[in-house]
Amino acid sequence: MTYFILKFLHLIGAVVLIGTGAGIAFFMVMAHFTGNATKIAGVARIVVRADFLFTATAVVAQPITGMLLAREVGYPLTEGWIVLSIILYLVIGAFWLPVVVMQMRMRDLAEAAEAAGTPLPPAYHRLFWTWFAFGFPAFGAILGILWLMIARPEFALSG
């Protein structure tokens, strides 16, 4: 029973990470292309909340449930696909943490433009495109982890 509970929680965490990430990306891109500071500010406020509420919770839960699940099944954490999954998870974090900061800054810049009745500043646009670019390696790493979790390929990472 413990195995199925852990597996369920781990799977829910993965779904939340992918779903929230894809949803945030979609809504931020759609808001951006309106060019409307009011809409962008509103969407960015929601996106930042969603990242803290859903993504951050799953980010904490995933390694915990993953380690407990590996222990329950008897997989050593040194197994190649697990090590590679952990590395990819760290890559995701290296892109996600700056993205959260960028989202907060884009929100602030859009709110300031909205309040002043001015166009979005160049700093907003630079942040947006950096934020956009950071999504590709992070999402690719998530897909890589999913593949590793499903396929569990046998390989050694050391010579």
Image (tube, helix red, strand yellow):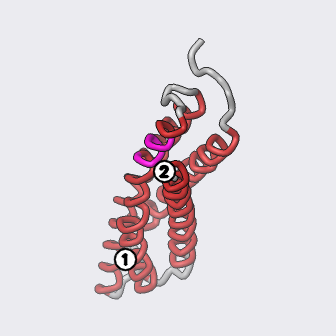
The mark found on residue 2 in the picture is 2
The mark found on residue 45 in the picture is 1
In this view, the residue in front, 57 or 92, is: 57
Image position of 109 (left or right of 67): left
Residue 47 versus residue 140 in the image, above or below: below
Q: Residue furthest top?
A: 159
Query: Total marks drawn?
Result: 2
The mark found on residue 115 in the picture is none
Residue depicted at x 34% and y 59%: 101
Which amino acid type is shown beneath numbered disc 2?
Thr
Q: Which mark sits nearer the N-terminus, 2 or 1?
A: 2
Residue depicted at x 56% and y 27%: 79
Residue 157 versus residue 100 in the image, above or below: above
Q: Main secondary structure of the magenta part?
A: helix
Provide the secondary structure element on which disc 1 rests: helix
In this view, the residue in front, 132 or 79, is: 79
- From which residue to which does the magenta span run? 64-69
Q: Residue furthest front?
A: 1
Give x and y (percent) for residue 104: 34, 66
Provide the secondary structure element on which disc 2 rests: helix
Which amino acid type is shown beneath numbered disc 1?
Arg
